[in-house]
Amino acid sequence: MAKVKDTPVQKPRIGVYGFTGCAGDQLILIHTEDEILNLFAAADIRSFVMASSNPPEGDLDVAFVEGSISTEEEREHIQEIRKRAKILVAIGNCAVSGGPQAMFANDGSFAKRLRDVYGEVKFITDPIEAAPIDAHVTVDYYLPGCPIDSQQAFALISRLLHGADPEPSLHPVCHECKLHENRCLLLDKKLCFGPLTKGGCGSACPNHGLPCVGCWGPQADGNFRQHFELLQSFGLSKEEVFRRIKNYGGHKILEFIKDI
Amino acid sequence: MRIIKMYKKFLEPFLECLGQFGRLYAPVRKNGVLTYGPIESISEAVFSDEHPLIPIKKLFHPMKFDMFRFGESGFQPDYSMVEKRVIIGVHPCEIHSLLRLDDVFMADPPDPYYSQLRHNSAILGFSCMPTENSLCTSTGTDIVEEGYDLFFIDLDQFYLVWVGSSLGHDMILCHDEFFEDEVTHEDIAKYVAWREKRNLAFKKSFAFRNMPDLMELSYNSEIWEQFGKKCLSCGQCSMVCPTCNCYDTTDVLDVSNKVSGRRERMWDSCMFVDYSLVAGGHNFRATRADRLKLWYTHKLKTFGKEYGRPSCVGCGRCVDTCPVDINVLTVSQALSAREVPK
């Protein structure tokens, strides 16, 4: 019986990068004590500034990118990462939708807002209107959330590491909310965005009696027109509902509400 | 069928002693919501007419669990959720819902998780008065003839107790002295009066028996489009319906190993867009109208074709829950009147 020779398999090379954001999504990856050592064992972490300094910058199998693109320097950096990475994953609301810093996305007031906040200063790198990663480069997979959910994140990471397709998440927050046996906040006329929002958070806010603010971003199958009508029947103005959903909806919400 | 009588003062000591038959479960109040859960003492149990938000199906068809771990050498099923249980305070519609679920999960080959949970659980039914949206007289599920070990009918000073199985009989023996075999004429008169009072207490009804035909006739009705415009696709109707039983399975691979992992099973709903999505991106029921039509047609007609009776048990949870008022009442009214209520 000939012995099968173990051929050393090259571990997937991974890089984790952060642009404009609070770094909370990278923190979730590091704070997942159950999995972080498995990840370090299963992958060749080439760059993870939060975990180690002076990374070598070479070719990558997967790049995880957090934060919005908000300066010229970041725009150049993301294009450079895209060139080196086979797969690029946007992680967190800022990278996926633009984040709260994109709540006024495309309303034409960027130059004025910049002046109002910073006055006439000389920037080290020129600011540009905060935008999600896919406004500048192609994104292969999305991990929404503010911050991302570690279970959802590691389900995707393990599939990518092993060459399987990640499962997209297509259900609203209400799915998990009912599994947590919460009474529907809409029945109490609360401004809840559960039905319009991607699930994956485990209905974190409704579990504490707080309405969903939509931080996982728009759920493509949401019935936006009907839901806005319902919220207005509670006595909320259309402007108020729009303002609230843009807080986390950034660039991604615009296409869903443009005809309402 | 043996029917015996027990004065109310004995209820608590009697139920306490049932711990020897398994872990006690009952409706309990958690953050203001009624939910089935394990109890340490009978004082925690809430005996009321209100239904728990999530039906009893969750105790037999768990919401989310790992079916098995898999690896290079095969797979190991995880039956760790199976335990001996005594479930107290189960309303008639809930017992009917389990009989409907049995039709699905116990059919050959039986679902090993469901059937083990079912075989290890005793059901103690309790009578109730109808709530605002109870529809069980419409669906013929207000009376139970099977599916319980003991059933308690509350007649103010005492209970009449139906013994529905040999296990129920053994339970009685644990405090034989609490029960009287003598049911008097007066007791029977009280029972009849209670039944009449209960029948008159229903506020709502729908033409359940007409539904299969109406569904058939309404297959191409514009009514579905109108409901489709309203539906939020939040899936709450499926989660709270005691006979909805669809689930999805997902293989979660271990981060550290390519060939090992776990298969997770989780409740699903045909209201979600990916439910009828198949390989190649084709979706049989992409529109909300089609999804709704499927739900109601299955609930009120097709399930009956397959298993002998439709699966709506008239609990009224869809009426309680849907934020945009799509439920068996509004749908059946719309199909009868050919118009969607505003």
Image (cartoon, helix red, strand yellow):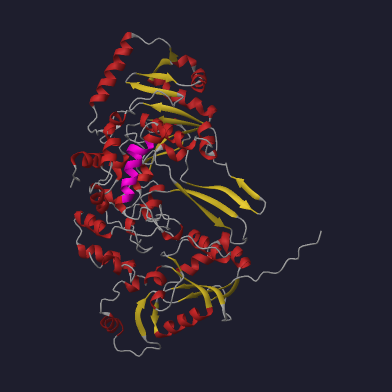
Question: How many labels sit on residues?
Answer: 0
Q: Is residue A43 left or right of residue B53?
A: right
Q: Quadrant of residue B181?
A: top left
Pinpoint residue A242: horizontal percent, then vertical percent. 25, 65
Question: In this picture, which residue range is highlighted in magenta?
Answer: B290-303
For the residue pair A236 and A218, the one nearer the viewer reads as: A218
A213 above or below B264?
below
Tell me which residue sits at (46%, 34%) in the image. B102
Q: Quadrant of residue B54?
A: top left
Pinpoint residue B142: horizontal percent, then vertical percent. 33, 27
Q: Quadrant of the N terminus of chain B?
A: top left
Pinpoint residue B45: horizontal percent, then vertical percent. 41, 33
For the residue pair B137 and A131, the one nearer the viewer reads as: B137
User: Does residue A207 show up magenta in the picture?
Assistant: no
Which residue is outermost to the right? A1
Pinpoint residue B255: horizontal percent, then vertical percent. 58, 61
Tell me which residue sits at (37%, 34%) in the image. B304
Q: Is residue A2 left or right of residue A45?
A: right
One can see residue B120 in this view: no
Q: Main secondary structure of the magenta part?
A: helix
B235 above or below A122?
above
Which residue is outermost to the bottom? A122
One can see residue B291 in this view: yes
A54 above or below B126?
below
